[in-house]
Image (tube, grey):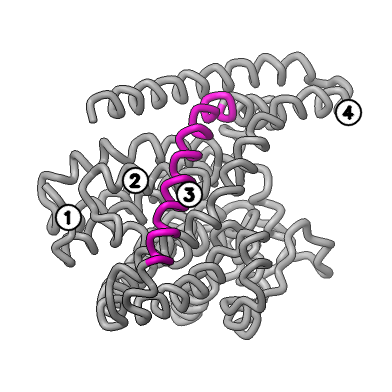
Amino acid sequence: MATSTNKSNRLTIYILISMVAGVLLGYMLNQHFEGGNVADRDKTLDYFSLMADIFLRLIKMIVAPLVFTTLVVGVAKQGNINTVGRIGGKALLWFFAGSFVSLFLGMALVNLFQPGAGMNLPIPTVNSALPIQSSLTLRDFITHIFPTSIFEALSKNEILQVVVFSLFFGVATASLGEKGEIIIKAFDAAAHVILKMTGYIMNFAPVAVFGAMTSVIAKQGLGILSTYSRFIGEFYIGLLILLGILLGVTYLFIKKRIVSLLRHIKEPSIIAFSTNSSEAAFPKLMIELERFGCEEKVVSFVLPLGYSFNLAGSMMYMTFASLFVAQSYNIHLDTGTQISMLLVLMLTSKGIAGVPRASLVVVAATLATFRIPEAGIALLLGIDPILDMGRASMNVIGNSVATAVVSKWEGALRG
């Protein structure tokens, strides 16, 4: 255990060093290419972004198979449908309570801070073509949950669809009794093979972080931080408040062990922050939660569900961003309308894990639903990578505490 802990600490240090080095090199490249040929700049930066792209592709390569194998094993080991329903019910209760708190906090803070006030943008007469596709209806969302092919869902990393199939498959496997034991052992072995692959892939994380940070800062420049500093600062204040709420509630359940939990999830949180992807941290997070003391059968069941239903950072951003755009156009939304927006987001925010720029897709759809100019999404595009870092990290923390609390509820928290 000591050896694995020391290795984990070293990797965390390497990732932090890579972040700082990436920011410094990115700033130098930004100054070098300032006022120069954009094509030459982008061609050079392609080599840096390639580092992050390869890492993310490797992670995505194993996420869907890992969710499939571990969730099937997790469900099948519960033994019966009643146990699955009990644990799933507790997890969903936490998820929806967390969703409401996250969305409500975003709504409250954006009304308090008023980050869009004073921009006084004219309402466009015709919405220009948007870089974000906003066609999203409740019917589309519900039908999209159920896969037409598990192979298609796996190939496209449709996590929610994989979760649905895995739940059916796991329950059916458990019902077979002794015959199902063969399948459980095979899937359990496959899951451990994939987790071993995770260890190999994670060694590449510092290089990926270096490339990602260099590319973002070189393109956007440090000035992007000051241009929208108020919005960025207030959003990160909101994330800190949300973090305080989550940790406070979690402390009520696991007491002083929360310190150990934070120590175990620091590396997955940093990986999510620096790569703008909570998905990138998923395999490592599973390992660390088991090391913390959560039983494998609970981790492999609750965590995949959390990645579909419990994206705390992303949900807080959705109300924050939607109302920010409304404020920018001097559009006043009364309390009732804002509550309606919150309830709509409670549904449309589910199952978005793994979708590129998923939060922006949902925000764009919300703007259209409430007759707010969709062109306002362009206000967010430039700073979205900076905001996404905080969102992704908070998503990881939110799912970690959820898994720990459900484990405690179930008496499945060792130590």
Which amino acid is tagged 4?
Ala
* Marks 1 and 4, how far apart at CA: 54 Å
Indicate the secondary structure of the residue bearing disc 3. Answer: helix
Q: Residue at x 44, y 59 (%)?
A: 187
Indicate the secondary structure of the residue bearing disc 4. Answer: helix
**Residue picked out by circle 4:** 39
**Residue picked out by circle 3:** 391
**Residue toward you, 229 or 91:** 91
**Residue picked out by circle 1:** 413
Please state which of the two labelled residues, at mark 1 or mark 4, is closer to the viewer. Answer: 1
Indicate the secondary structure of the residue bearing disc 1. Answer: loop
The answer to the question of whether label 3 and label 4 lie on touching residues, with beta carbons closer than 8 A, is no
* Marks 3 and 2, how far apart at CA: 11 Å
Which amino acid is tagged 3?
Arg
**Residue toward you, 391 or 74:** 74
Q: Is residue 293 left or right of residue 153?
A: left
Q: Reading the chain from its start, which is encountered first: label 3 or label 4?
A: 4
* Marks 3 and 4, how far apart at CA: 31 Å
